[in-house]
Image: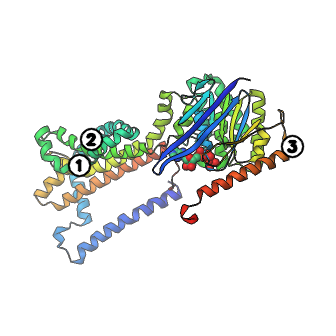
């Protein structure tokens, strides 16, 4: 790591250290019953215990796989649908209210219905995550695609491009940034929906772990679960940002 | 003289929230093979709109725009366009931008020749050092030169240029003008050029179409008497000065008319 990288890393670390200190401070201040707040080191100890004895990795894997599949399927459908809606104005006027209606529904509210129609297995969780990522992704896609200016298409036409060439050489490069943004938004929403989807009688998974812990009032386990969800979401977002930076070197960004 | 392009009693109006806006009105003139037409008129009068009908992006409301005898149905590679907004592709490097047209099926450029053509235009436009840079690193003038290079590279027989040298400094501008004259001499093109510079119009064009304040009508069509090939010495000729003051006068009139139009109604009443 070079000097600037080290500095950025250090800067990024400061708020985390601050948060941990605050956590201890709240606990020691005496305002809150200490049995309600496990100390950071207790949570860390619990983390290693779960990791080595209780198969925390299996939970992490189960959750990550669900999010991954849900987002992949959701975006796979959201990209063409969002593209068509963004490209053809009439389609948008036609579908806009409906999409906003469904997007506004919190996935949790749909859980009873999903259980009725899809049972309580893996499929049901996938349906919820698919739902969440599709509707968040489709909006980002069509907002983005409808902003594409006709100028570049006109330029390509005057240079002799046919329909297929315009699509491949102009429209796809202009759509990639919006696909990446849709992915990032969908990932965020999917992690937020994960616990809800795992409320459906899941055996394993971080959401299930939190759910089970709450029945036995195991606060330290709940903390471990929450922190794991946050960390994995953060790592996925970082990876996606790296990929975005790679693919979109040409973009004029305010941030270096 | 074969007619390449014809404007035949062409009018165009846009529907706006405040009603119909007449932008081009009853314009008729022909562009013959080998002509160099310069269109000059005040800003916002309808020059780009006029050109975009010939480029194939806009249809006249009434009248006809013909290219090679047929009504213009859409854009095509035989009519190269240099857009006022450049339209340089931001996701491609400078070199890839120039190569864009060369890789299209319609232009039949063998892959082996593309490299050499790109290098040629990179050199001509002074962009060699930036061949692998993205447009975000270019200045306005460099983007404009890139747009010119990209259009020249596919060698269209007919060039539509919308203020192609507007963002360039005086020195580069005159280099680009001379380069255009040289390209015309060797490749024999027909050109329609929109410009705000009276000197540029006289130096380059064989005919100058002065258009009125909006809606653009034809104020006067002026033949430029200098034969091609031309060089900068024509600018010293007395006829050049006479033409210049005549056209300046016309443009000035129309500029004032356009200004009067733009003035908010609440001030005049
Ligand atoms: N698509 C459109 N819809 C409505 N009005 C338009 C449209 N395109 C152009 N106009 C209007 O038509 C008028 C002429 O525009 P145009 O771009 O042809 O001007 P111009 O002569 O090229 O000006 P400039 O020298 O500044 O480039 C302007 O008032 C503009 O607002
Ligand atoms: Mg214009």
**Callout 3: few (<14), some (14-19), or many (20+) C-alpha neighbours within 10 Å?**
some
Residue A216 in the image, given as x and y percentages of width and height: 10, 58
Q: Which mark is residue A194?
A: 1
Q: Which mark is residue A70?
A: 2
Q: Disc 3 or disc 1, which is closer to the eye?
A: 3
Residue A90 in the image, given as x and y percentages of width and height: 36, 39
The image shows a total of numbered marks equal to 3
**Between residues B29 and A161, which one lies in front from this camera angle?**
B29
Q: Quadrant of the C terminus of chain B?
A: bottom right
Q: Is residue A24 left or right of residue B220?
A: left
What whole-number distance in Å separates the C-alpha atoms at marks 3 and 2? 76 Å
Q: Residue furthest front?
A: B269
Name the subunit of mark 3: B
Q: Residue at x 44, y 59 (%)?
A: A9
* Mark 1 or mark 2, earlier in chain: 2
Q: Which mark is residue B239?
A: 3
């Amino acid at each position: 790591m070079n000097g600037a990288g080290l500095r950025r890393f250090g800067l990024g670390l400061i708020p985390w250290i601050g948060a941990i200190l605050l956590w201890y401070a709240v606990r020691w201040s005496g305002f809150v019953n200490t049995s309600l707040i496990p100390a950071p080191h207790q949570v860390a100890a619990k983390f290693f215990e779960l990791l080595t004895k209780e198969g925390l990795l299996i939970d992490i894997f189960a959750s990550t796989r669900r999010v991954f599949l849900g987002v992949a399927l959701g975006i796979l459908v959201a990209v063409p649908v969002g593209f068509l809606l963004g490209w053809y104005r009439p389609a948008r006027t036609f579908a806009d209210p409906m999409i906003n209606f469904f997007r506004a529904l919190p996935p949790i509210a749909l859980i009873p219905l999903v259980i009725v129609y899809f049972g309580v297995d893996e499929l049901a969780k996938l349906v919820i995550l698919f739902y969440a990522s599709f509707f968040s992704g489709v909006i980002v896609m069509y907002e983005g695609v409808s902003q594409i200016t006709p100028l570049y298409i006109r330029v390509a036409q005057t240079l002799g491009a046919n329909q297929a060439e315009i699509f491949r050489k102009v429209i796809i490069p202009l759509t990639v940034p919006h696909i990446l943004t849709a992915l990032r938004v969908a990932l965020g929403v999917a992690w937020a929906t994960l616990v809800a989807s795992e409320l459906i009688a899941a055996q394993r998974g971080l959401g299930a772990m939190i759910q089970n812990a709450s029945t036995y009032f195991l606060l330290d386990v709940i903390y471990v679960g929450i922190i794991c969800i946050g960390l994995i979401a953060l790592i996925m977002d970082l990876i996606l940002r790296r990929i975005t930076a790679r693919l979109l070197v040409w973009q004029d960004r305010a941030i270096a | 003289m074969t007619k390449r392009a014809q404007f035949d009693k062409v009018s165009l109006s846009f529907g706006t929230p405040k009603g119909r806006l007449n932008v081009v009105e009853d314009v008729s003139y022909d562009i013959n093979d080998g002509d160099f037409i310069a269109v000059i008129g005040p800003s916002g009068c309808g020059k780009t709109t006029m050109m975009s009908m010939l480029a194939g992006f806009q249809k006249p409301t009434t009248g006809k725009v013909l290219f090679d005898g047929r009504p213009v149905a859409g854009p095509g590679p035989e009519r190269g366009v240099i857009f006022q907004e450049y339209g340089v592709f931001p996701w491609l490097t400078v070199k890839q931008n120039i190569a864009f047209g060369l890789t299209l099926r319609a232009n039949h450029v063998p892959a082996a020749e593309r490299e050499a053509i790109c290098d040629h235009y990179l050199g001509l436009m002074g962009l060699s050092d930036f061949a692998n840079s993205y447009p975000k690193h270019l200045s306005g003038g460099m983007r404009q030169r890139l747009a010119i290079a990209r259009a020249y590279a596919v060698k269209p027989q007919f060039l539509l240029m919308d203020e192609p040298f507007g963002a360039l400094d005086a020195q580069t501008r005159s280099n680009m003008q001379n380069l255009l004259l040289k390209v015309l001499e060797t490749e024999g093109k027909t050109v329609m050029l929109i410009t705000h510079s009276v000197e540029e119009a006289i130096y380059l064009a064989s005919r100058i179409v002065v258009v009125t304040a909006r809606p653009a009508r034809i104020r006067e069509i002026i033949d430029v008497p200098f034969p091609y090939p031309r060089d900068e010495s024509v600018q010293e000729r007395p006829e050049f000065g006479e033409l210049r003051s005549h056209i300046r006068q016309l443009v000035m009139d129309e500029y004032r008319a356009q200004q009067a139009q733009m003035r908010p109604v609440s001030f005049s009443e």
